[in-house]
Image: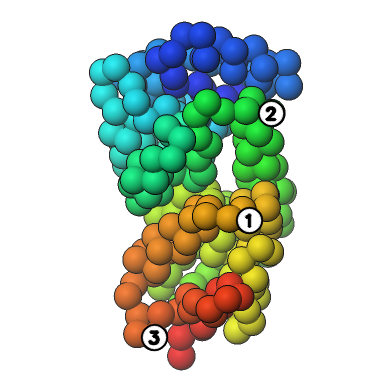
């Protein structure tokens, strides 16, 4: 992992400010001022992670994200308008790994990027034979893949983290505060629905079991039920 970040933002002043800060924190930064240029750079495999503004002058950031998800599993952090929950929800449904509202604190952005890259790097160091099975699911940490009935699940980087934590504690309740810290690398804050959206996406991708294999334990967190 080389800490190469692609910053797709049309506001030149903000883009240059964030790029300078990221560079000072050890990131190699590529910049794009519109969606088409950002998409081309991302698909050219010139980055390890993407910071993507939703409001872009040519094509929307959500359309860029849809195209990325059709071709790559690059982790993506969205820049969204503060208080615009609709954009965040749609972003997670399309496949975003995390979001940060604008105007953003550069220090918080760095912390989010470092946490996501750190989790990916940790999994890539896992032994190839350290595979685990949970009913119809098989986890391959070395390749950051989870298979269902030997078919790979199409997961984002963060969805993978959330699911593998739940699987590691299958049958037990994982508190939301712990799951947020272990899977996303940050504290759960009031009114933050990030984790709820990832759980919703995972349920859809795993199949609409009845009862659901990822159960909500009201007031506590979530539990993964291994189907029999």
On the image, the x and y values in percent for residue 147 come to 46, 65
Q: Earlier in the sequence, mark 2 or mark 3?
A: 2
- Note whether 37 is above or below 202 in the view shown: above
Q: What's the mark number on residue 70? A: none
Left or right: residue 223 versus residue 208 is: right
Separation (CA) of disc 3 from disc 1: 26 Å
The answer to whether residue 159 shows anywhere in this view is no
Quick one: label 1, few (<14), some, or many (20+) residues within 10 Å? Answer: some
Separation (CA) of disc 1 from disc 2: 18 Å
Q: Nearer the viewer, mark 3 or mark 1?
A: 1
The residue depicted at 28 percent of the width and 33 percent of the height is: 63
Left or right: residue 202 versus residue 17 is: left
The residue depicted at 44 percent of the width and 13 percent of the height is: 11
Q: Mark 2 highlights which residue?
A: 107
On the image, the x and y values in percent for residue 73 come to 45, 42
Residue extending farthest bottom: 228
Q: Earlier in the sequence, mark 1 or mark 2?
A: 2
Q: Mark 1 highlights which residue?
A: 188
Quick one: label 2, few (<14), some, or many (20+) residues within 10 Å? Answer: few
Left or right: residue 57 versus residue 108 is: left
The residue depicted at 51 percent of the width and 9 percent of the height is: 13
Q: Secondary structure at mark 1?
A: loop
The residue depicted at 39 percent of the width and 46 percent of the height is: 85
| Along the viewing direction, whichever of 190 and 39 lies nearer the viewer | 190
- Note whether 16 is above or below 89 in the view shown: above
Q: Mark 3 highlights which residue?
A: 211
Coloring basis for residues: rainbow
Q: Secondary structure at mark 3?
A: loop
Left or right: residue 110 versus residue 221 is: right
Q: Earlier in the sequence, mark 3 or mark 1?
A: 1
Quarter of the image with the N terminus is: top right
């Amino acid at each position: 992992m080389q800490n190469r970040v692609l910053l797709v933002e049309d506001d030149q002043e903000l883009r240059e400010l964030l790029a300078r800060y990221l560079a000072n924190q050890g990131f190699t930064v590529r910049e794009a001022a519109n969606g088409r240029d950002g998409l081309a750079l991302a698909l050219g495999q010139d980055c390890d992670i993407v910071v993507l503004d939703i409001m872009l002058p040519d094509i929307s950031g959500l359309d860029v994200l849809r195209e990325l998800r059709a071709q790559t599993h690059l982790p993506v952090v969205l820049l969204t308008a503060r208080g615009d929950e609709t954009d965040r929800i749609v972003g997670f449904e399309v496949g975003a790994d995390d979001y940060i509202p604008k105007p953003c604190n550069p220090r918080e952005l760095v912390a989010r990027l470092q946490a996501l890259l750190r989790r990916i790097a940790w999994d890539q160091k896992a032994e190839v034979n350290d595979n685990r099975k949970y009913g119809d699911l098989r986890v391959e940490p070395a390749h950051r893949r989870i298979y269902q009935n030997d078919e790979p699940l199409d997961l984002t980087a963060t969805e993978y983290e959330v699911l593998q934590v739940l699987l590691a504690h299958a049958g037990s309740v994982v508190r939301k505060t712990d799951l947020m810290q272990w899977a996303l690398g940050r504290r759960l804050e009031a009114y933050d629905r990030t984790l709820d959206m990832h759980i919703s996406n995972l349920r859809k991708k795993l199949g609409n079991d009845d009862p659901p294999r990822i159960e909500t334990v009201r007031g506590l967190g979530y539990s993964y039920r291994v189907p029999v």
